[in-house]
Image: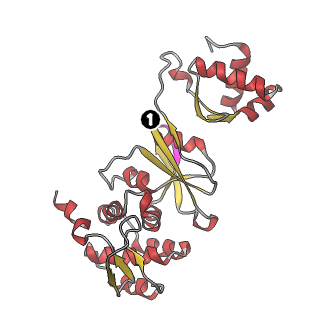
Amino acid sequence: MAGIGSKEAELIAHLSDKRKRVFSIAEAAEFMGVSRTSASDLALRLLKKKKLIKIEKAKYLIVPLEAWKTGEYTEEGIILASQIVKPYYISYWTALSFYGWTEQPSRTIFIATTKPKKTIELQGTNFKFVRLRPNRFFGFNEQWVGNQKVSVADKEKTIVDCLDQPRYCGEIIEAVKGIWNGRQELSFEKIIEYACIMNNGAIIKRLGFLMDVLEIHKPKLRKKMKENITSGYVALDPCSNVNGAHNKEWNLRINVNVKNLTEWRTH
């Protein structure tokens, strides 16, 4: 490890052995048997030598050894996201993009977690953490991104999460694109199952209406969704204005121009 001191090398080697890409000052101090002040000084020296990237206060990401020669390191945002918080999974707009269901890029990586965490900016990318209750934290698996595994919402949970909180997927129009572009790959039965587990009636209301708009005909599932409709009206797109016609069939307030939900298919 040329270019760094023995204590710095000792810290990097230990963390590498533990396969830890991210560490806190408290963890460094405990391992090195020094005060947090000394550990902080050690991290700052490594930071100046471009061996670390600061994620947030007292928390750092180790730059891979293969990037040490150039001193330049840019890693795909999804991989960085996987290192910042545990537990986590990638979802919403980022998962839509991962599956190729939206053409709209986003400078924000959306991460579901059970922990409260503020948005951070790292290497020009924003990382937005969406806190979920434990009963809603499910439906994800590991996917290869480059040479690393990252937890990503499965295809059905991606749609459910987007319908649950459209503000994190670029509003309802991006959820529509996900449903349409993924229609051959998705299990709509599993989507309904997930929606019931989420215990949010708005998900089924939005899904049923959008399947009608997109003319995705599944009579048996439609009947099942109708049986699970909850009382009260909710907005089709909670990000848009409060006004809109009431759809009695799905208990939805249609507060967006329905034509806009499908006209993108002709472009």
Q: Residue 12 at x, y = what percent?
A: 67, 24
**Highlighted range, magenta:** 146-150
Residue plotted at (23% across, 65% down) = 260
Mark 1 neighbour class, 10 Å CA radius: few under 14, some 14 to 19, many 20 or more: few
Compared with residue 192, is residue 93 higher up or lower down, i.e. above or below?
Answer: above
Q: Which amino acid, by three-letter code, is at mark 1? A: Gly
In the picture, which quadrant includes the N terminus?
top right
Compared with residue 10, is residue 132 higher up or lower down, i.e. above or below?
Answer: below
Nearest the eye: 23 or 64: 23
Q: Residue 214 at x, y = what percent?
A: 26, 72
Nearest the eye: 180 or 131: 131
Left or right for 35, reference 202: right
Residue plotted at (47% across, 87% down) = 231
> Which residue matches tag 1?
124
Question: Is the image coloured rainbow, by chain, by secondary structure, or in one colour?
Answer: secondary structure
Which quadrant of the structure image shows residue 19?
A: top right
The answer, for residue 19, to whether it is visible in the render is no
Whether 148 is among the magenta residues is yes
Whether 119 is among the magenta residues is no
Left or right for 29, reference 82: right
In the picture, which quadrant includes the C terminus?
bottom left
Compared with residue 123, is residue 233 higher up or lower down, i.e. above or below?
Answer: below
Q: Residue furthest top?
A: 3
